[in-house]
Image (spheres, grey):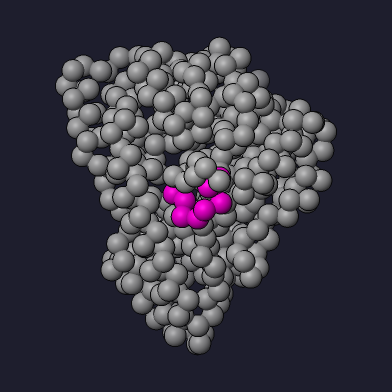
Amino acid sequence: MSESDLPVPSVPNARDAVRALRPSQIREVANAGFGVPDVLPFWFGESDRVSPAFIRDAASAALAAGATFYTHNLGIAPLRAALADYVSELHGPTSCDNVAVTSAGVNALMLAAQLVVGGGDRVVAVTPLWPNLVEIPKILGAHVETVALGYGEHGWQLDLEQLLAALTPDTKMLLVNSPNNPTGWVMSRDEQRAVLAHCRRHGIWIVADEVYERLYYGDAGIDADGAGSRTAPSFLDLAARDERVICVNSFSKAWLMTGWRLGWIVAPAALMDDLGKLVEYNTSCAPAFVQQAGIAAVQLGERFTQELVRDLKASRDHLVRALSAVPGVDLKTPPGAMYLFFSMPGASRSLELCKALVREVGLGVAPGSAFGPQGEGFVRWCYACDTARLDAGVERLQRFLAQHGAH
């Protein structure tokens, strides 16, 4: 047989579940900004400030001391203890046995999904939502259905009855992100109580993405005794630690550590041995010197975090005032997170609009369609920067609208 008679090999492809994943439209817009001079980037969810010095110094000291070796799969004991104390102070008694350290919040979300869902399982997610949460279960072969927040006079709101109706007995997992990326919506304590009771009855796992819990500007989390005033309402305030509740958190937002890739999970102790296996087969462990920086963050960073939240609230209020004066912009002040999610002329085709904003006036915002079909018609603007930079962005938006005859 000659070489010409050999069968032509098929094109090598990833498996269907992976090929069906939607690419990040936020990255698509950012990529469109490469080579465009003087772009103002408000598209990613991070501050323009570097991590605080006391955190960077802790990592440097750990590196100098030789903290470059493998650690326990679930994290070094001092960081797990520090996190248990931190969570206990905010949400009630929590043991080290309920805490695992992960290589970023998104890694924590993947691990949580790997723990409880598999091929054919039904997952429900509250949307609009950061795309990673919706796509992660699909990688595992799960089927994801969505319940959309509604937008109206009072901003983004949950139809609780619609969500409870969607949480049928065959549902394996509920995904909730509150405070929410991109909308800034915050699930109320009463809504959490109702959802937790419903999921208890049907044996449904709750995976709560609470990475923005400290970026909270409302009072929905304040009980009569004042508890919860430093954080948004959390399922950890209501659930026992041995229930089907997994809470995911990250160092990225409250301590400006996006590039460090460090997060944690609070989950039933009964899961920890199996979680350790999954960590081993995913990343083995988080870097030792980064974990030392995490200890500094949770033990020394409370004052920093409270000042950060005050600064973010001021930036939010400033941008709300500025954008509210722009004809055609419709927005409501969100109670949490670090974004404004608003409608404007042209946002019915938000990806096309955002690429045009980058190309024509050097303004980088994220398209609402990046957060699912329910986000179309809106754009997301991260306000974690100084007000002068926000003002410059608003001026560019006004210039773009004037150029396109939107008044």
Residue at image coords 37%, 24%: 82
- Nearest the viewer among 51 and 365 is 51
Residue at image coords 69%, 30%: 205
- Residue 358 horizontal side relative to residue 347, left or right: left
Q: x, y (%) of residue 339?
A: 47, 58
Which stretch is magenta?
A: 212-223
- Residue 383 horizontal side relative to residue 139, left or right: left
Residue at image coords 82%, 38%: 168
222 within the magenta span:
yes
234 within the magenta span:
no
Q: Main secondary structure of the magenta part?
A: loop
Residue at image coords 62%, 26%: 240
- Nearest the viewer among 245 and 88 is 88
Q: Is residue 99 above or below residue 251?
A: above
Q: x, y (%) of residue 272?
A: 55, 16
User: Which quadrant would the N terminus be assigned to in this image?
Assistant: top right
Give the image quarter of residue 399.
bottom left
Q: x, y (%) of residue 366?
A: 48, 59
- Residue 404 horizontal side relative to residue 257, left or right: right
Give the image quarter of residue 207.
top right
Tell me if I can see residue 272 in this picture. yes
Q: Is residue 320 above or below residue 229?
A: below
Q: Is residue 339 above or below residue 137?
A: below
- Nearest the viewer among 320 and 42 is 320
Figure label count: 0
